[in-house]
Amino acid sequence: MIDIRSVGKTFSSQAGATEALSDVTLSVAAGEFVSIIGPSGCGKSTLLRIIGDLAEPSAGEVSVRGKSPRQARLDREYGIVFQTPVLYDWRTAIENVRLPMELAGRPRAECLSRTATLLRLVGLDGFHAHYSWQLSGGMQQRVAIARALALAPSILLMDEPFGALDEMTRERLNAELLEVRRETAATVLFVTHSIAEAVFLSTRVVVMSPRPGRIARVLDVDLPQPRTEGTRALPRFFELVTAVREALRKSGA
Amino acid sequence: MRGLGEYIPALIVFALGIAAWEAAVFAFSIEFYLLPAPHVIVASLTENWPVLVESGLYTFTEAVAGYALGCGGGIVAAMAASRSPAFAGLILPYAIASASVPIIALAPLAIVWFGIAQGSKIAIVTLMTFFPTFIGTLRGLLSVSPDALHLMRSCAATEWQIFAKLRFPHSLPYVFTALRSCTTLSMIGAVVSEFFGGPVKSLGVYIKSTASLFQTRQAWSAILVACALGLVFYFAVALVERVATPWRAPREAV
């Protein structure tokens, strides 16, 4: 599905060259939920942006369903959720969700039914006509998730989507995300700072080390599906959280 | 829309100000040619009403025509410049420098170039309103956040779609900020340009000639008309702004 081969990324500035990523190799199969976790500056967002063709790798290559990231982007294979909701102020919630469909030139009738379905899916049925300043942070991020799903993309790239939310909202949105995902077959790449979030959501956790960003360890998460609130209380959940924390510590984070 | 009730404090302050003015003129026995009392100005306003209306419309036409040309040109030029952010970055400092030139100083020359009638005033107002609108619009078009652009890219949007669905709507609050301040600028430009010469029935000439004859009450009544027209212009544009940018929170409104 996604093949990352020896990808490196170097940023150059007046202060000199900074190596953000070094020799990253990773394969993601269709339907996987892979979290990438690491400290700030480990290049995890950069990796996500390279996969999504929002940045160019300095070395190595990425192929997505056998295509270049650029072709995959032009084929609208990606749905992206950023750390901030990035809602357009001048659009209501439903108009924001509709944006990718509009850009793809989908017929109006299809847009109407699909956007209504998506807003119901993320629990915002009564908020179609609200502008972003009228929504809470959690609601705004739900709109952003619905928008990312608008074209039923095969790959969902999420860059610390819940990083700016409080712990309670974050846990609720974690559970909701898994439910939403059951409706779509998307493969998910999920960048996060939170160990518990990574373990709870993922089928695999990729631990990265900082400066330059490398893959330190990859852990399989063998928690039973579907994940529920009860999952967080399982002894295995704690073992995995501890294992990820150990891996992060050993990697020098 | 704001309720009318919110304007009540402002109206009370206005009424108190007028009352204080009236009281001060009588308390300190100020000669009317120095500072006429408000009721004297109002009396002069009704006396000279036909002339003032004719002069007001003449000057207002100049302001609106120059405003339309200057602001329209500024918006179109900014859109063209924003096609190339590198080019826009290159000319923006010059545009900002031009905005600080006292364009009104060109008014006597404008008369040489465009004649004593409305043409020279329209030219000055056009120049005065062009640069602020150009700068405001260009800033609005270029200040789109990187992630907002990334979102467009990830949806495989075309350049035209990025302009129409992101840059343009994003720029509207900036554009309207410029458009509102240009209403005031355009009235100033028109009236002051007329000080350097124009037909008798224009506000600038009327103010200048009555003031030089110590007919201050007439001058004040013409100033009052200029203020009223400026306010009408300002609120008309503010109203268009409310209709054109319905998404903005009420607290943002002016």
Image (spheres, rainbow, N blue to C red):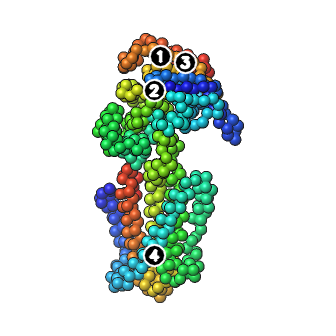
The residue lying toward the viewer, choosing from B164 and A165, is B164
The residue wearing badge 3 is A218
Q: Are marks 3 and 1 on the same chain?
A: yes
At mark 2, the secondary structure is strand
Q: Is there CB contact under 8 Å for labels 2 and 4?
A: no
Q: Nearer the viewer, mark 2 or mark 4?
A: 2
The residue wearing badge 2 is A187
For the point 46% across and 30% down, which residue is it?
A: A155
Q: Chain of mark 2?
A: A
**Precedes in sequence: disc 3 or disc 2:** 2
Residue B184 rendering spot, x and y as whole percentages: 46, 68
Quadrant location of the C terminus of chain B in the rendered image: bottom left
Say what amino acid the circle numbered 4 marks: Glu
Q: Is there CB contact under 8 Å for labels 3 and 2?
A: no
Asked whether residue B132 appears in the rendered view, the answer is no
Question: On the image, which quarter does residue B99 sit in?
Answer: bottom right
Say what amino acid the circle numbered 3 marks: Val
